[in-house]
Image (tube, rainbow, N blue to C red):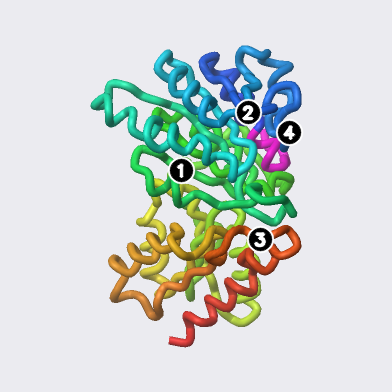
């Protein structure tokens, strides 16, 4: 069965189907119950599963994650919602020093299949701490898997795959695209796992790697490049840790050029890791230095200024054009 759904509804449906399939799956977070979450992702789940499985928590992100770790010890699969990206930091210690380390600390005897859902990114006109892209903090932490969907179909299936994973998984959800609609095939899982990249648009002249909210930006830039006679391949990275480098490497070896796009600041961003690996493994294939397009090394700006901060199709196209100057 194929349905056309917004990304938010696809995630909610993925949560519902996972809860129906396994009574050990539960949801925790602030306002996820009767309200259905601030973005209504969990709308209707409280009515179906009740307050024991859709748990409205106190305003304490550290206790949400700490409780989820304890539940994992007892065989449960907690799915934790952090309301906004900037609110995850009170839980940072629990995530990075406890959740990420527990499997290694117990020499593999303890699994902690906890999922943490984080709406992230800008372009929603929000106030401070509501538009950040903190993925690099978590990709830097060994023991965490980090993924981010960009389509409704991926939103559904990556949610299901994250919940089924035996490792802790952070799912960064592009909140500016929550109401972007797309077809969801509920009967057929995609061939790639949640931890593999996909070719969003084939091309031959340059490669653009993007993830989450910037995939649509990269596709728009590729369409503009086509008008100029250049064929740009767009890779939706999907998994930020682990990174599906073979897909990226194969593409760059064909095209000879790479542009990496993300909303987070370029300085210290995940794009630097990708650029370094490509330089190491594709040195004799590269026709130009790897280009990076992202946010600036400043705090996220007020809503009226965010259009100047966020990468747009023109900035991505400029980077593609710059790579052809070599």
Q: Which residue bears the numbered disc 4? A: 40
Q: CA distance from mark 2 to mark 3?
A: 26 Å
Q: Which tag, 4 or 2, sits closer to the chain's start?
A: 4
Q: Are marks 1 and 2 in contact (CB under 8 Å)?
A: no
Q: Are marks 1 and 3 in contact (CB under 8 Å)?
A: no
Q: Quadrant of residue 302?
A: bottom right
Quarter of the picture holding the C terminus: bottom left
Q: Which residue bears the numbered disc 3? A: 301
| Residue at x 44% of width, y 57% of height | 270
Q: Which tag, 4 or 1, sits closer to the chain's start?
A: 4
- The stretch drawn in magenta includes residue 130: no
Q: Are marks 4 and 1 in contact (CB under 8 Å)?
A: no
Q: Which residues are magenta?
A: 1-11
Quarter of the picture holding the N terminus: top right
Q: Nearer the viewer, mark 1 or mark 3?
A: 3
Q: Are marks 2 and 3 in contact (CB under 8 Å)?
A: no
Residue 131 drawn at (x, y percent)? 64, 51
Residue 14 vs 248, above or below: the answer is above
Q: CA distance from mark 4 to mark 3?
A: 26 Å
Residue 169 vs 233, above or below: the answer is above
Q: Could you say whether the residue bearing mark 4 is in a helix, strand or loop? A: loop
Residue 268 drawn at (x, y percent)? 43, 60
- Left/right placement of residue 142 relative to residue 154 reads left
Q: Could you say whether the residue bearing mark 2 is in a helix, strand or loop? A: loop
Give the camera-side residue of 132 and 247: 132
Tag shown at residue 59? 2
Q: Which residue bears the numbered disc 1? A: 146
Q: From this viewpoint, which residue is outermost toward the bottom?
A: 325
């Amino acid at each position: 069965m194929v349905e056309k759904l917004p990304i938010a509804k696809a995630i909610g449906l993925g949560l519902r189907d996972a809860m129906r399939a396994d009574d050990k799956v539960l949801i925790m977070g602030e306002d996820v119950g009767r309200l259905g979450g601030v973005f209504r992702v969990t709308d209707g789940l409280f009515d179906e599963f009740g307050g024991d499985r859709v748990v409205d928590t106190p305003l304490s992100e550290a206790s949400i994650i700490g409780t989820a770790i304890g539940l994992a010890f007892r065989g449960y699969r907690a799915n934790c919602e952090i309301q906004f990206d900037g609110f995850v930091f009170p839980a940072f210690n629990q995530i990075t020093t406890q959740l990420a380390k527990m499997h290694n600390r117990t020499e593999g005897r303890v699994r902690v299949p906890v999922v943490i859902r984080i709406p992230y990114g800008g372009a929603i006109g929000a106030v401070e701490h509501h538009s950040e892209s903190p993925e690099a903090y978590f990709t830097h932490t060994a023991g965490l898997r980090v993924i981010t969907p960009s389509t409704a179909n991926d939103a559904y299936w990556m949610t299901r795959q994250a919940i089924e994973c035996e490792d802790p998984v952070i799912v960064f959800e592009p909140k500016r695209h929550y109401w972007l609609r797309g077809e969801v095939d509920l009967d057929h899982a995609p061939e790639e796992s949640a931890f593999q990249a996909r070719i969003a648009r084939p091309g031959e002249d340059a490669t653009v790697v993007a993830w989450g909210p910037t995939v649509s930006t990269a596709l728009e830039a590729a369409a503009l490049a086509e008008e100029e006679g250049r064929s740009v391949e767009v890779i939706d990275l999907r998994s930020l840790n682990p990174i599906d480098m073979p897909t990226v490497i194969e593409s760059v070896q064909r095209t000879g050029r790479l542009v990496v796009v993300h909303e987070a600041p370029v300085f210290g961003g995940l794009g630097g890791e990708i650029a370094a690996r490509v330089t190491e493994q594709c040195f004799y294939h590269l026709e130009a230095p790897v280009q990076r397009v992202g946010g600036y090394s400043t705090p996220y700006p007020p809503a009226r200024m965010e259009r100047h901060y966020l990468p747009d199709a023109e900035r991505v196209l400029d980077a593609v054009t710059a790579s052809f100057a070599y």
